[in-house]
């Protein structure tokens, strides 16, 4: 399933990140996509763009009109699909949107076009019997009710998974022990390299030495020899210095060629004297020359005047091919020298801490001399580089290179020779001790390895792993044989089904939906067989009363398109599968009845029959959205596997968010208003979390009572005595008492400030509102308990809890 969608750039979606935008309130938890997803958004809010991302998974294509598309689809296994690899995905997706209609039902848009035919299984008793026999052998493949071969495969897969997990656990446990002993733990051999003699010790070396200590011929040292070895390794020893100096004199090697280039003379014929005299102006004119050369008829970008042909000739002569060639050569030389300057900065002698203290003084002097030579060499290179830059600025002016180098190759070689002598003497000094100390450390290390393998029972662990590998391999082989057998039989079903392919059945399926769900007896899809170049070809026509229906209403187009899509879910490529389905706004130009029929078709054919792995349904229509809340959603452990999202557009940017409670939880505003009054009755004080309940109480109460009491007393009431209809209905329901006056006061003063502006400067009277809210609830409960209980149920309140909290005798 699809878990999240990030859209950095596609249509009006910019920098949309799921983990940032889709979070619960309260809790701030990331909410992923669910099995069943309902999306509501107004027209042009981005729903179709979202559908095109999903449809790209089906068609493996995305419109070239999207410039630099960038999106990421994260699946439930945390793998990702993005704009670079979506055409390689293997998800089974079926998408209904306007692009689906254009591709498959272009006749609806253009009467001279066609409707693509599709085939579903036809009838052939012999072939059908073969298919049924294979299916009977394989069993049911539905996720929740697998049987026979599918159940056998599931059981084997689960068993193989358990065995693989156990095998992995055994391997990882041993690997962790080996890693800890070799390098990671504080008592590892690497961390104790002063004792065991190898600062570069690793798991591979440990494995080699384990193999060695397990040989029958291996004998570990005894306790007395161990003690002697520990005393011996206390002598300070240093690792041999292996650093060597590698140096090539690039300056000396490249100078002859660069010197020739610097001193190269260019012909001065037809050169512009003013530019030759001023390098800055020459560089400025050259940039302008390069910028304008592509369009010589353009005006000057600086002064706005046309550039004369004569001026172009002067400039062409000045910036001729010979100049360009020389400039390119100089730039190549410049790159070489600059690269050498960067490289030479990294040439250093090793740190003196690698040497014995006896050689530190000599090494310091040698390092100072070495660094001085390197700085001189770098200075020579930088001077040469400056001359190259100078010639680039005055390309027509040769430069005489007369420079005495500060770097001496002879002196530098002598310094390197001195360093090598110090290094060799240092290493020789080390060798006097290294032999015995190395052998002592090796013996101690092998003793440590022997103790380690005995402690962890290494051989026993290896045997357990080997036994588990045999079990796993055996069951995996059995699982693969069953899997291969199922795939072979499924392939046989496909091959046999191809023999039943029948385009007429596809048209009949569409007509079944048209007639059974929408009552269109006169409008139908018709499969027409034609001969084209001696080949059979099937095409679909839309006919009304036997004639091709050219002039379809928008509603008819919507109905036919959606019936076509639903029928196509039974085509030979989809039948028996559970695809990911997206349905984008299928109710265009439909009246209330047909909107309900669309809902019924979706509910009966998709939800009740559980024909999808995951589904997305989007709409801009509140009436259709109301029906979508009534779908037969899947449930697992009493938790509905559905989620609601809101698609919004703010100026030129689209985004997705969790659907707010007022839109998701309430079928009508009447339920919402009742819930607000109920919450007011339950709160004692105002806080940041419930401020809106009290602040909006006046308006909410007025609207709720107007609706509730009108339907309670719909007859026209006599208002000749000056009392309003609302007042009379209040008295009729609640009786003449002080609380009715309080109700009128709250609904007037707290919902209108025109003649009572002072109210807006005063704190909200919470006890007064709470009293009224409790009175209204208790009265409704007393006079119409069924209505009251139904209202409680609509806002998710248990009657048991309600009976424990509401006092029915407040009036």
Image (spheres, rainbow, N blue to C red):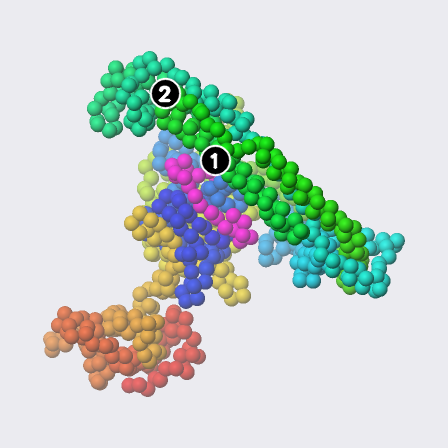
Q: Which mark is residue 379?
A: 1
Q: Nearer the viewer, residue 704 or 285?
A: 285
79 inside magenta stretch: yes
Q: Dot 2: few (<14), some (14–19), or many (≥20) neighbours within 10 Å?
A: many
Q: Nearer the viewer, residue 465 or 247?
A: 247
Q: Which mark is residue 555?
A: none
Which residue: 36% across, 17% down?
320
Which residue: 28% across, 19% down?
273
Q: Mark 2 highlights which residue?
A: 396
Vertical relation: 488 (above or below) 187:
above
x%, y% of residue 149?
68, 51
Which residue: 38% across, 42% down?
98
Vertical relation: 621 (above or below) 294:
below
Q: Nearer the viewer, residue 700 or 242?
A: 242
What's drawn in magenta, residue-wise? Answer: 57-80
x%, y% of residue 450?
80, 59
x%, y% of residue 445?
77, 57
Q: Nearer the viewer, residue 568 or 191?
A: 191
Element marked by disc 1: helix
> 722 left or right of 601?
left
x%, y% of residue 501?
56, 37
Which residue: 31% across, 28% down?
280
Dot in front, 1 or 2: 1
> 112 left or right of 731?
right
* Mark 1 or mark 2, earlier in chain: 1
Element marked by disc 2: loop
> 282 left or right of 334?
left
Which quadrant does the C terminus fall into? bottom left
Identify the residue at the far right of this view.
217
Q: Quadrant of residue 463?
A: bottom right
58 inside magenta stretch: yes
């Amino acid at each position: 399933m699809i878990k999240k969608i990030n859209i950095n750039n596609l249509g009006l979606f910019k920098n949309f990140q799921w983990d940032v935008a889709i979070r619960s309130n309260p809790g701030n938890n990331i909410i992923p996509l669910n099995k069943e997803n309902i999306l509501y958004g107004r027209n042009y809010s981005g729903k179709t763009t979202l559908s095109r991302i999903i449809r790209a998974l089906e068609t493996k294509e995305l419109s070239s009109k999207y410039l630099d598309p960038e999106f990421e689809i994260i699946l439930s296994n945390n793998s990702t699909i993005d704009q670079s690899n979506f055409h390689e995905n293997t998800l089974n997706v079926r998408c209904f949107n306007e692009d689906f209609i254009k591709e498959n039902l272009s006749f609806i848009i253009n009467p001279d076009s066609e409707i693509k035919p599709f085939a579903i299984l036809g009838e052939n008793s012999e072939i059908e019997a073969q298919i049924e026999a294979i299916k009977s052998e394989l069993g049911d493949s539905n996720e929740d009710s697998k049987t026979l071969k599918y159940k056998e495969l599931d059981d084997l897969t689960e068993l193989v998974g358990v065995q693989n997990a156990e095998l992995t656990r055994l391997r990882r446990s041993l690997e962790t022990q080996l890693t800890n002993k070799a390098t990671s733990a504080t008592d590892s051999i690497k961390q104790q390299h002063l004792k065991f003699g190898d600062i570069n010790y690793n798991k591979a070396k440990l494995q080699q030495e384990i193999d060695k200590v397990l040989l029958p011929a291996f004998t570990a040292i005894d306790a007395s020899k161990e003690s002697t070895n520990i005393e011996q390794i206390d002598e300070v020893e240093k690792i041999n210095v292996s650093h060597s100096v590698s140096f090539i004199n690039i300056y000396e090697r490249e100078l002859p060629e660069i010197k020739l280039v610097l001193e190269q003379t260019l012909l001065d014929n037809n050169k512009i004297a003013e530019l030759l005299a001023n390098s800055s102006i020459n560089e400025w004119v050259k940039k302008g020359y390069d910028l304008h050369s592509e369009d010589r008829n353009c005006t000057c970008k600086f002064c706005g005047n046309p550039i004369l042909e004569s001026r172009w000739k002067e400039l062409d002569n000045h910036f001729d091919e010979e100049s360009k060639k020389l400039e390119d050569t100089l730039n190549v030389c410049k790159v070489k020298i600059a690269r050498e300057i960067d490289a030479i900065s990294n040439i250093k002698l090793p740190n003196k801490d690698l040497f014995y203290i006896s050689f530190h003084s000599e090494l310091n002097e040698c390092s100072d001399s070495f660094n001085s030579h390197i700085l001189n060499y770098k200075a020579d290179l930088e001077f040469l580089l400056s001359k190259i830059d100078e010639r680039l600025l005055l390309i027509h002016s040769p430069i005489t290179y007369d420079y005495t180098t500060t770097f001496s190759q002879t002196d530098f070689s002598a310094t390197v020779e001195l360093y090598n002598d110090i290094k060799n003497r240092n290493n020789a000094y080390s060798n006097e001790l290294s032999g015995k100390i190395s052998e002592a450390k090796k013996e101690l290390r092998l003793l440590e390895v022997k103790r380690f393998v005995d402690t962890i029972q290494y051989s026993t662990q290896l045997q357990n792993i080997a036994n588990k590998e045999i079990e796993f391999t055996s069951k995996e082989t059995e699982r693969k044989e069953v899997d291969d057998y199922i795939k072979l039989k499924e392939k046989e079903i496909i091959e046999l089904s191809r023999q039943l392919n029948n385009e007429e059945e596809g048209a009949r399926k569409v007509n079944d939906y048209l007639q059974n769900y929408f009552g269109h007896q006169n409008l139908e899809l018709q499969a027409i067989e034609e001969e084209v170049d001696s080949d059979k070809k099937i095409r679909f026509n839309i006919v009304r009363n036997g004639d091709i229906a050219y002039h379809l209403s928008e509603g008819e187009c919507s109905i036919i398109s959606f019936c076509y899509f639903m029928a196509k879910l039974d085509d030979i490529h989809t039948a028996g599968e559970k695809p990911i389905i997206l349905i984008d706004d299928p109710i265009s130009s439909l009246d209330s009845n047909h909107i309900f029929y669309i809902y019924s078709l979706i509910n009966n054919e998709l939800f009740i029959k559980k024909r999808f792995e995951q589904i997305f349904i989007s709409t801009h229509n509140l009436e259709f959205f109301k029906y979508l809340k009534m779908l037969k959603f899947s449930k697992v452990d009493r938790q509905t596997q559905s989620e609601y999202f809101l698609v919004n557009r703010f100026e030129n940017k689209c985004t997705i968010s969790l659907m707010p409670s007022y839109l998701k939880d309430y079928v009508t505003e009447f339920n919402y208003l009742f819930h607000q009054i109920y919450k007011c009755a339950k709160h004692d004080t105002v806080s940041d979390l419930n401020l809106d309940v009290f602040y909006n109480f006046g308006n909410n109460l007025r609207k709720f009572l107007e609706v509730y009491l009108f339907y309670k007393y719909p007859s026209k009431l006599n208002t000749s005595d000056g009392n309003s209809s609302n007042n009379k209905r209040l008295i009729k329901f609640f009786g003449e008492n002080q609380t009715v006056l309080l109700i009128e006061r709250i609904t007037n003063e707290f919902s209108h400030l025109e003649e009572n502006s002072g109210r807006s400067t005063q704190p909200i009277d919470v006890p007064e509102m709470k009293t009224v809210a409790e009175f209204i609830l208790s009265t409704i409960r007393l006079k119409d308990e069924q209505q009251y209980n139904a209202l409680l149920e609509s806002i998710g309140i248990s009657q048991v809890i309600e009976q424990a909290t509401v006092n029915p005798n407040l009036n």
